[in-house]
């Protein structure tokens, strides 16, 4: 069959779809902190879990390496990067600026559906924190759900895309810490900040929404840095 030369550059649709799905699944593992800094990722194991061949996983991993969310070690093993304290401080400053801006935008542009989604996420995490034995992995997921409900309410897809890229790097550190340190959840700082953000967005208070998200991010960062678990 004589095909136009341009078609040689087009990937099969099924393969492309599987690659996108694999990328989304692996990205969510990073954002949700289910992959820890320094942890190795087996492409074969990931393919088996996702129910796909190794090719879509290899494509997804290549994208995540380009995003600097994963790295290839000298022995060719794929792993989650280990973040230094200086890198984490820099990332925290950027997150405060961008995610605070997104919260302020949410206070201005949110609609009733957004308010309902934010309320559900805030109430679910608060309920989990009040249990005698909270499910910490679930709390981590609920924390992510709350934050992205806020950012989606900004109605800026580009802004949400930028924040997801930041969480690809931050997720393994901030969420692993929450899962390993239940006292952070019991202390209730995140719960209080989330409630502040929810109220501010409902009241169209842009400055208060920005301040609440900034306090949430900086408070968690201070705890993480104080533990001294990051490389110098």
Image (cartoon, rainbow, N blue to C red):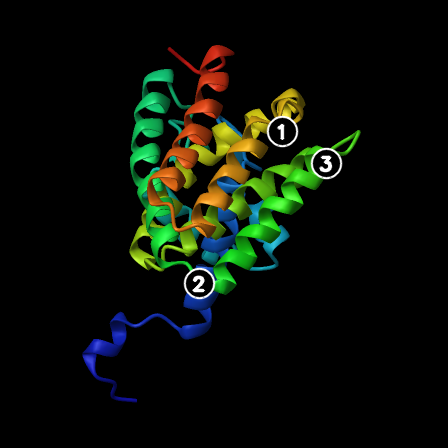
The answer to whether one can see residue 7 in this image is yes
Tag 2 or tag 3, which sits nearer the N-term? Answer: 2
| Helix, strand or loop status at disc 1 | helix
Query: Is disc 3 surrounded by few (<14), some (14 to 19) or many (20+) residues within 10 Å?
Result: few
> Between residues 221 and 114, which one lies in front from this camera angle?
114
Q: Quick check: 217 left or right of 120?
A: left
Q: Residue at x 56, y 32 (%)?
A: 192
| Helix, strand or loop status at disc 3 | loop
Q: Which residue is mark 3?
A: 135
In the rendered image, which quarter contains the C terminus? top left
- Nearer the viewer's eye, disc 1 or disc 2? 2
> Between residues 41 and 151, which one lies in front from this camera angle?
151
- 159 shown above or below 31: below
Residue 221 sits in which quadrant?
A: top left
Tally the numbered discs: 3
- Percent across and percent down for residue 65 are 36, 41
Q: Residue at x 36, y 60 (%)?
A: 155
Q: Which residue is mark 2?
A: 111
Q: Which residue is mark 1?
A: 179
């Amino acid at each position: 069959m004589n095909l136009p030369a341009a078609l040689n550059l087009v990937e099969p649709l099924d393969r492309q779809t599987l690659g996108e799905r694999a990328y989304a699944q692996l990205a969510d593992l990073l954002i949700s902190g289910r992959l820890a800094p320094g942890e190795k990722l087996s492409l074969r194991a990931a393919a088996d879990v996702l129910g796909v061949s190794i090719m879509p996983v290899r494509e997804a991993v290549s994208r995540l390496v380009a995003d600097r969310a994963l790295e290839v070690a000298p022995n060719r093993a794929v792993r989650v990067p280990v973040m230094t304290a200086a890198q984490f401080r820099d990332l925290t400053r950027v997150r405060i600026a961008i995610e605070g801006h997104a919260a302020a935008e949410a206070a201005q542009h949110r609609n009733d559906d957004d308010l309902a989604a934010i309320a559900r996420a805030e109430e679910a995490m608060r309920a989990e924190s009040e249990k005698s034995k909270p499910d910490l992995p679930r709390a981590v997921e609920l924390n992510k759900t709350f934050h992205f409900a806020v950012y989606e309410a900004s109605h800026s897809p580009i802004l949400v895309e930028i924040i997801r890229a930041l969480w690809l790097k931050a997720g393994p550190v901030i969420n692993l810490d929450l899962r390993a340190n239940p006292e952070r959840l019991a202390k209730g700082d995140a719960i209080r900040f989330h409630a502040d953000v929810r109220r501010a967005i409902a009241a169209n208070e842009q400055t208060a929404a920005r301040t609440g998200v900034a306090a949430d991010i900086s408070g968690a960062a201070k705890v993480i840095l104080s533990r001294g678990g990051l490389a110098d």
